[in-house]
Image (cartoon, helix red, strand yellow):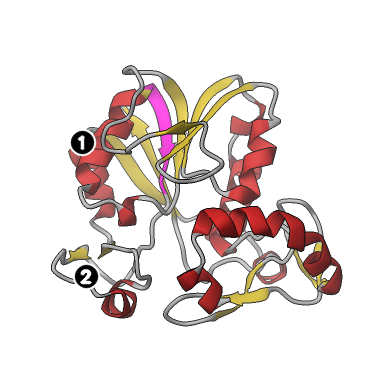
Amino acid sequence: MKWLLNFIPRPLLISLSIWFRPFIKFYFKGTRFTDPIDGSSYRKFLPYGYRKHRENALCPGTLSLERHRLLWVYLTRETSFLKENLKVLHVAPEQVFYTKFKNLKKWDYTTTDLHSPLADIKADLCDLPFDDNQYDLILCNHVLEHIPNDIKAMRELYRVLKKDGTLIAQVPLEENRDITFEDDTIIDKKERTRIFGQYDHLRVYGKDYYFRLQSVGFKAEGIDFLASLSNVEKESFALPKQERIPVAIKK
């Protein structure tokens, strides 16, 4: 798995997974873990991770990771977004959500990314080709850590979001780190993986991430949704041990 992620381009991985997933899903069928996104159950999930493999992280069927499953449970239990008439922008759309969101009849759903085959519009996050105040909801998960000028990208997300609109922007964030660490002189892929956790990451966010969002105008906070779930659910869904969901509102 690690070799595949490091050496095969992600757009190709997305295309290949469509063919192989049914066989992998059948092989790992069981009862120990359940993916809340599609309700399917497995005897185990797959390990995943660049710097360090996390056991039971990747669902064989949907290819969801811990953060995807956490976000899905949050969206379905704590929000009414999936039932509302919304204009939605999905940046770097995750394959696990793409079809589900595309099929929501109440959503006017647009995807964007520079490279993803799932993107409706190829665009630079720092220079989005959309008018001001266009979207009710923007999903932009695990994207900002890849962007050299993340503040500029945040300003663009703020610009195209409607007043009182919501941005959900998950990032790799270390809860024990106060200040985000970034160093653009680190260009070696192995060194980036060692320091930032992944070869194409440019920073490790700290708790000041919310202040960065606030600096461009958002009202932002980290929702500790995990605290509301039972230990049985956390184990069954194979959720992250510690992660808040960053929610930012345009005021």
Give the spatial CA distance, label 1 vs label 2: 28 Å
Kind of residue at badge 2: Ile
Tell me where residue 200 appears, x and y as whole percent.
34, 64
Tell me where residue 60 appears, x and y as whole percent.
72, 66
Identity of the residue drawn at 56% across and 49% down: 94
Question: Residue 195 or 161: which is nearer the viewer?
Answer: 195
Q: Secondary structure at mark 2?
A: loop
Q: Is residue 159 left or right of residue 110?
A: left
Residue under pointer 1: 216
Question: Residue 174 or 118: which is nearer the viewer?
Answer: 118
Magenta-colored segment: predominant secondary structure: strand
Residue under pointer 2: 187
Q: Is residue 210 magenta?
A: no
Identity of the residue drawn at 66% across and 58% down: 16
Q: Is residue 165 magenta?
A: yes
Asked whether the viewer can see residue 228, the reply is no
Q: Secondary structure at mark 1?
A: loop
Q: Is residue 223 above or below residue 45?
A: above
Looking at the rendering, the stretch of residues picked out in magenta corresponds to: 162-169
- First along the sequence among labels 1 and 2: 2
Q: Is residue 207 above or below residue 247?
A: below
Kind of residue at badge 1: Val
Q: Are marks 1 and 2 in contact (CB under 8 Å)?
A: no
Asked whether the viewer can see residue 188, the reply is yes
